[in-house]
Amino acid sequence: MTKVLIVAELDGHALNSSTRKCVACAAKLGADSIDVLVLSDNCADAAKAAAAIDGVSKVLTLEATHNSAPLAAVLAPQIAAAAEGYTHVFGPSTTFGKDVMPRVAALLGVGQVSDIMSVESARSFTRPVYAGNALLSVSVPEGKTIVATVRTASWKDAADGGNAPVEALQVNAPIPTHTRFVELAAAASERPDLQTAKKVISGGRGVGSAENFDIIYKLADKLGAGVGASRAAVDAGYVANDMQVGQTGKIIAPELYVAIGISGAIQHLTGIKDAGTIVAINKDPEAPIFEIADIGLVGDLFEIVPELEGKLG
Amino acid sequence: MNKILVCIKRVVDYNVRIRVKPDGSGVVTDGVKMSVNPFDEIAIEEALRIREAGNAQEVVVVSIGDSESQQQLRTGLAMGADRAILINTDSEVDPLAAARAFKALIDKESPDLVIMGKQAIDDDCNQTGQMLAALWDRPQATFASKLELSDGKARVTREVDAGLETIEVDLPAVVTTDLRLNEPRYVKLPDIMKAKKKPLETLQLAELVADATLQVNANNWAAPEARSKGVMVNSVDELISALRDKGLVA
């Protein structure tokens, strides 16, 4: 029997689409059942959304005030208790999943498979190492619960079409008070979310300043695109940290990725290798970004980007 | 506080172009430059700044590996750590075994704070800090970009997908570092000389951890499929036309 428990990720009280990626990955296992666990102070909306995903067998909720913020130290003991009887426990390879899932694994006394890119069998997987410069095939011995995170950029959203029952779960788990949520400073943006956007326009060090990023935003708005950045641009303070694309930032797979003034360090390239079409605009013809770009244009971004924006309908 | 423990890992330097061995048994490491994992270097720097601000007495760096890892511990000492511990093993160690070893060391050393990088840039696992916190039954503050200490507590700003999250944890706790926590100092030659005289103790992994069996078996390594070489265009008009051909713009 292959029984999968997926730890749902929430944005506030809404279901984050990373949960759909986990369901898509779990479906590849040939699982007998796929259950989704929602932990929140108000589970209703997320549970309803999870129950509607095709392939989900059951939605379990752990609703309590102490689950109002996603604190790994608080959630992990409850998830570990809920994991009883499951062969697989999956979470998304987002900052939420990366934070909580290894804590769950350690409580269960097992290792973790990080960043599943593909499923070879119910106990073997492929994952990226060395910033995606090597792909490692791994397997977990029989008899151990498989705790894993799912590399969201490698999987398509599992679609709606299910109608799973929702059950309130009771678990016996210690709730520590040593970790307290203070605040979340989210950069308010009207633009499409970087991780789910079909098109992404990114700026790098070549953009030169926070003010100059305006031309990136204008082009993005013309295309209805999300906006990303290289580590260099974030370190230089041009944009907020949550816009960083790369090995240690967000790994994304848009249909169109436009890299502007980004030289293309391997740590950045690992974040975009699953993109459909990569366009690079850079003044340096030797920039490594051109080695992986589908379409390259050498020139001054301060001339090219406004011209491009003006000529697009 | 009294003591900060910093966990560091010897990894292939981040500038090295990684090559997979033809037989798929790993990546080429012979003759390749090795360094302190960059995130762990940030961890060392943060511990030193806390000590230099008068908020800690001692910074201890610890690594798990064969005797070669002494080089990275010496780097930590040259940066300014007070002493070093090598948990010696010739075998491969996975995050759970590493966390178990650090937990056993914590039982001997009783640190008030443990800092390490959020991930090692070789296996990219991003697990050890979280696992250690679980085994220790203490708070974790992962992906830290700011750390403030006051009366037995730490206020930590974390880089999360949605923005910046701030949490407060009671000490002792495990903190894992993100890129923007600080910029590590450069090591000067006299510091390297001085570091040679600082204490470096060696413990055996087998003495600390009864079971270090690999939890996840590595079967085969492969090079990723390269993206095919694209085309260069010479003008914005050509770019727009290429994008239209692919149906990516109207």
Image (tube, rainbow, N blue to C red):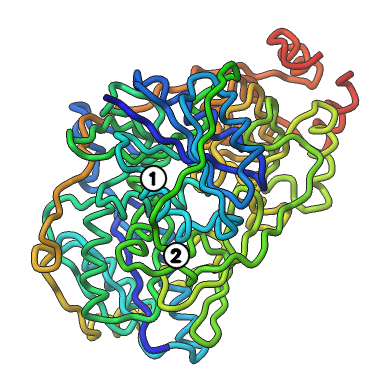
Which element carries disc 2, helix, strand or loop? strand
Question: Are the residues under marks 1 and 2 on the same chain?
Answer: no
Tell me the kind of residue under disc 2.
Gln
Q: Which of the chains bears the disc numbered 2?
A: B
Mark 1 and mark 2: span between their CA atoms?
21 Å
Which residue appears at 65% of the width and 44% of the height? A11
Which residue appears at 21% of the width and 64% of the height? B101
- Tell me the residue that label 1 is attached to: A82
Tell me the kind of residue under disc 1.
Ala
Q: Position of residue B151 (x, y in %)?
A: 53, 87
Q: Which of the chains bears the disc numbered 1?
A: A
Q: Tell me how many marks there are.
A: 2
Q: Is residue B127 above or below residue A261?
A: below
State left or right for residue A304 relative to residue A121.
Answer: right
Q: Position of residue B177 (x, y in %)?
A: 48, 63
Camera-nearest residue between B84 and A288: B84
State left or right for residue A204 relative to residue A87.
Answer: right
Camera-nearest residue between B184 and B64: B64
Q: Which mark is residue B140?
A: 2
Which residue appears at 27% of the width and 46% of the height? A111
